[in-house]
Amino acid sequence: MCKMKVIVIGSGKGGVGKSTISVSLALLFKMLGWKVGLIDADIYGPSLRGMLTPEIFPKEENGFLIPACSKGIQVVSAAYFSKFEKGAPVRAPLINGIIEQFVYGIKWDERDLLLIDLPPGTGDIHLSLLQKLSVDGAIGVTMPQKISVLDVEKSLYLFQSMNVSLLGIIENMSYYQDPLTGERHKIFGEGGGRALAEKFQTKLLGKVPIDPLLLESLDAGEGAKFSLSRDELLKIAVEISNQLCDHESGKKIVEVKKIDHQTFAVEWSKKRSVHKFSKVQESCPCVLCAEKDRPSDPNVSAMSIELVGNYAVKFEFTSGCSRGIYTWQNFQEF
């Protein structure tokens, strides 16, 4: 993609799991083929470093900050600066300098999607970022309860006043599902996400359940491991990807045709490439295949092929896998 897309994720308050959603989406977008950058803009209480243990630490190079890297995600956070390790008080001039660094002083490595995890409130940090960056869309995160909705509304009004397109609402901690009975318990009430979506005339992107495995993996700095929340969060990532990409690729006619039992063709703008189902299956990006280390099957085929918006394709393989979503980058750079 020629221009890095920028999405801000806000809630107007703390405690709704916004950072959990931000990290989860970053990893799922990566799985869908995006090259993802992630900014922890909560200068006073940065937390993303604890969720994504860095494999590569940030460094300075020719006056620019090279981001940290964890699980293929490039991460920028105030937590990497020693001044913030023990929660030192920070005055506004220093905050403004850090935001300037985040906006103009980061040397990203060919990212095509940047997620910004906004801090609680609707203050100077929000205004500075929204004024200085060309933002492609915003996501509001709420809990089902009414008191959460009241605070999140303030964040959505800010996005509207800054002419930032609202991509939709995510209702987090929507319910807890008993692993033995399957019964859903609505611990924090219900209806908050739907009410916000209707009031601001946007989409309710999804209702994400409480996921103990996800929370445990993030607390351990292992990134996001999903159980109950996987399908809902993946659906949200696909929906957002469609919104970001449709206006760019909608005029291009993409076709995926099965040639025979072993091969298929991708045709786009008078270009054509031929691929083997077995080769595609080897690199399946879905969570289950990544965890199982699925062996290669030279005879695998596809029972069905389905376009996902204008940016990807989904296969139902004869091996039983039907979750993998492949962007055109998986096949060829057009």
Image (cartoon, grey):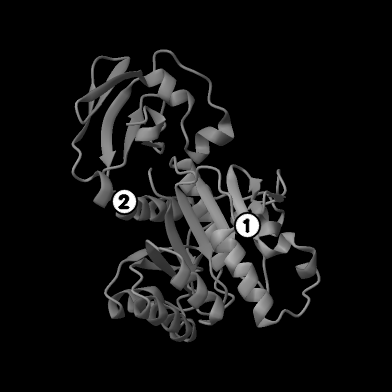
Camera-side residue of 55 and 313? 55
Type of the residue with mark 2? Asn
Is residue 117 left or right of 240 when viewed as pictured? right
Spatial CA span between label 2 and label 1? 26 Å
Left or right of residue 311, residue 20 in this image: right
In this picture, residue 328 sits left or right of residue 246: right
Q: Between tags 2 and 1, which lies in front?
A: 1
Q: Secondary structure at mark 1?
A: strand
Residue hosting label 1: 76
Report the residue at 59% width, 75% height from top.
15
Q: Quadrant of the N terminus?
A: top left
The first of marks 2 and 1 along the sequence is 1
- What residue lies at 73% left-to-right and 59% top-to-bottom? 80
Q: Which residue is mark 2?
A: 242
Q: Amino acid at mark 1?
A: Val
Helix, strand or loop at disc 2?
helix
The residue under the point 35% across, 34% down is 328
Q: Position of residue 139 (x, y in %)?
A: 42, 66
How many neighbours does mark 2 have within 10 angstroms: few (below 14), some (14-19), or many (20 or more)? some
Q: Are marks 2 and 1 in contact (CB under 8 Å)?
A: no
